Amino acid sequence: MFKAKRPLSRLLLFVLLLATLGLTSCAGAATAQNWSGLSTDGENLYVAYGQGVLGLEASSQELLWNFRPENAALFFYAPPSVANGRVVVGDYGAAQGLFSPQTVVSIYALDVTGNTVQTEWARNDLAKDRIVAAPLQVDGVAYVATADNQLLALDAESGDELWRFNADFSIWAQPTFYDGTVFVASMDRHLYAVNAADGSEKWAVELSGAMSAQPVVNPDENLVYAASYDRAVHALDVATGEEVWSVAATDWVWSAPALADGTLYFGDSSGNVFAVDAVSGEVLWQSGVHAMNVVAGATQNPPAQIKGAIQASPVVHDGVVYVASLGNEQSEEGLLVALDAASGEELWQATTPVPLFSTPAVVGNVIVVAIQSEAAILQAYELETGDLEWSYLPPQP
């Protein structure tokens, strides 16, 4: 398919990134001035937090291990990728000093057997700009997207480069693998289908907005969904990239939709939440996270009206959609909301100490959010009631 490349203004994207990072540096934040990346294997939690990465047993909140590179100037944003006892994670890079301004970015593979952590390999010669997206491990290959426009395929055991694919601008979205194809969304407005065997391009489609959301594949319908800053979610044919339908949001869609039981759920930067039929794109319901019941510890009657911008992906579990939002700009508190998946009706909400940027994780009977506050870096809320179950703050190094 013909691809007319039209890179975005680099100044515009730079301003966008600075604005995003600036939102995280709120008063009262913990030492690390960045959002945390969170992932789980269903039993343990893995957190890219500040200057390191840690593993935590979810049921007991026991710290299993804590990985911190020697360079104290490094920070980690991207959620770690976990497969077969191996964590693959990239850092946000660090400048080498006044006389060597180049940013050095590293990718690490960690053996996290039990409660120990060992570095299997580390590569600082592959990427020249930040790693914001979570890596993806499939069949012994680690796919790593970088802000210097690269999709890297690495041997997960050795770190050897197998191939690389070049986009026209930064890749902030985690790749998606399906049936021998890697789908990757770029800030250059393109969704790419890349041959997983050799990195060659199968097709590329240009949308009218940049994308920071992971593509989502629906194998039953041979569709791949792309969420975009053009205020829409697009359904494309997996084989050809031809658009089948699109559904409009009210603002930018930052993060990946969630697909469950034939329905696609997504939120936008104006705090609206949508459920659409995954086959036709028909809107089944629209809800929102615009009312906060508790502000600064005080019950609001009527509830405080907020924008409730959504930057994280929804999480769907047992007929409930959990939505994490930036919450209240005035009080600098976040909001976690549980919605009925069938109707969009609010079931409960919980005010969090700081805005929520990262996608939550369900483990056992709780949903865990990553935060940046002096009190905790993780908080877990009971799935049915929204009651705070536990908070976790790692020991100071």
Image (cartoon, rainbow, N blue to C red):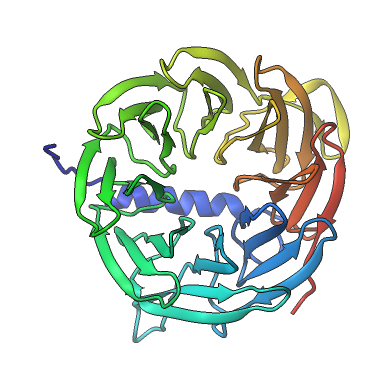
Question: From what the image shows, is residue 39 above or below residue 287?
Answer: below
224 to the left or right of 239: right
Residue at coordinates 31% horizontally, 72% vertically from top-left? 161
User: Which one is in front, 291 or 61?
Assistant: 61
Question: From what the image shows, is residue 277 above or below residue 32?
Answer: above
Residue at coordinates 41% horizontally, 15% vertically from top-left? 280
User: Which one is in front, 195 or 327?
Assistant: 195
256 to the left or right of 376: left
- Quarter assignment of residue 339: top right
Question: From what the image shows, is residue 334 above or below residue 272?
Answer: below
Q: How many marks?
A: 0
Residue 254, percent across and down? 47, 39
User: Which one is in front, 395 or 45?
Assistant: 45
Residue 6, percent across and down? 18, 43
Residue at coordinates 46% horizontally, 79% vertically from top-left? 122
Q: Quadrant of the C terminus?
A: bottom right
Q: Evaluate whether residue 31 shows in this view.
A: no
Farthest left residue in view: 2
User: Which one is in front, 161 or 370?
Assistant: 161
Residue 140, percent across and down? 43, 65
Q: Quadrant of the N terminus?
A: top left
Residue 272, percent across and down? 57, 24
Residue at coordinates 41% horizontally, 84% vertically from top-left? 97
